[in-house]
Image (cartoon, helix red, strand yellow):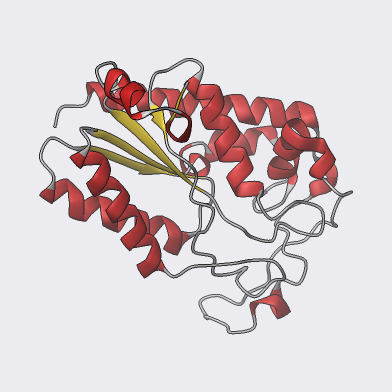
Amino acid sequence: MYILENITMVEFKRYLKQTKTIVFPFGTIEEHGSHLPLNTDSLIIQESLKSAAKKKKFFLAPISYYGVCTTTKDHPGTISITPETLRRLSLDLIMDAHKKGLRNVLLISGHGGSLHMSALKETAEILIEQLKGIKIAVFSPYDLLWKELSALAETPNDSHAGEIETSMMLYLAAGLVKGRAAEEYPDIPRPFVVKDKVKYWPGGVWGNPGKASAEKGKKAMKLITDKIIEVLDRIERLKR
């Protein structure tokens, strides 16, 4: 595994002859109900990438733990950044990676929030025009695998801190799962933007954690890992 923070500059130069691909993972410190830890998004994507790195050669950068949280920003424990900060951070990371000889860049997020993903995609759109020879992919596995992950769940419309996320945490780190929060869904009145989001979503759960299991989590993690490997293969074949 080419774990970026664990290798020397000599190893970096040697590995660069074998791969020009780097993955920058993004997570959050964000509430995930009363039963899951604040690093849920970060842990799931990190473990998925570590599994992928056993089968595929690429540089795996350290995760950026802070993301853009909107609906959950006022819940206890959530520490959010602005879209501007995320755009600036991701832009700097890609530009310097390109300077060091990397040409295939994946921004993979364990958090699928709309403003969060939009900020990453905006950065990619800017740099794809500016940097010679670069290829960039931006995605959250939940967007690419919505149908497949939904098929694993017994809960219709399962999402944040619900059945599937709880299942993955049971599989990865059962000791961090503190019981099960009650089934809940946000009740924010569309199309309005409301200030007091906690009022409309007090428990911060979207789904039914009570139906979670480690076996479902294992299947979900395999889906995510396989999808990451698929995208890695595709970016290497993609014509610039």
Count of picture labels: 0
Q: Is residue 195 left or right of residue 171?
A: left
Give the percent coordinates (x, y) of residue 153: 71, 38
Residue placed most toward the observer, 119 or 220: 119
Query: In the rendered image of this protein, does residue 149 appear above or below residue 194?
Result: above
Residue placed most toward the observer, 9 or 211: 9
Quarter residue 48 falls in: top right
Give the percent coordinates (x, y) of residue 38: 69, 55
Q: Residue at x 72, y 33 (%)?
A: 172
**Looking at the image, can residue 156 be seen?**
yes
Quarter residue 224 falls in: top right
Residue placed most toward the observer, 176 or 12: 12
**Looking at the image, can residue 224 be seen?**
no
Q: Residue at x 72, y 70 (%)?
A: 76
Give the percent coordinates (x, y) of residue 61: 43, 38
In the rendered view of the protein, which quadrant contains the C terminus? top left
From this viewpoint, which residue is outermost toward the bottom? Answer: 195
Query: In the rendered image of this protein, does residue 159 appear above or below residue 71?
Result: above
Q: Is residue 95 left or right of residue 45?
A: left
Q: Is residue 122 left or right of residue 160?
A: left
From this viewpoint, which residue is outermost toward the right? Answer: 179
Query: In the rendered image of this protein, does residue 114 appear above or below residue 162?
Result: below
Q: Residue at x 72, y 80 (%)?
A: 199
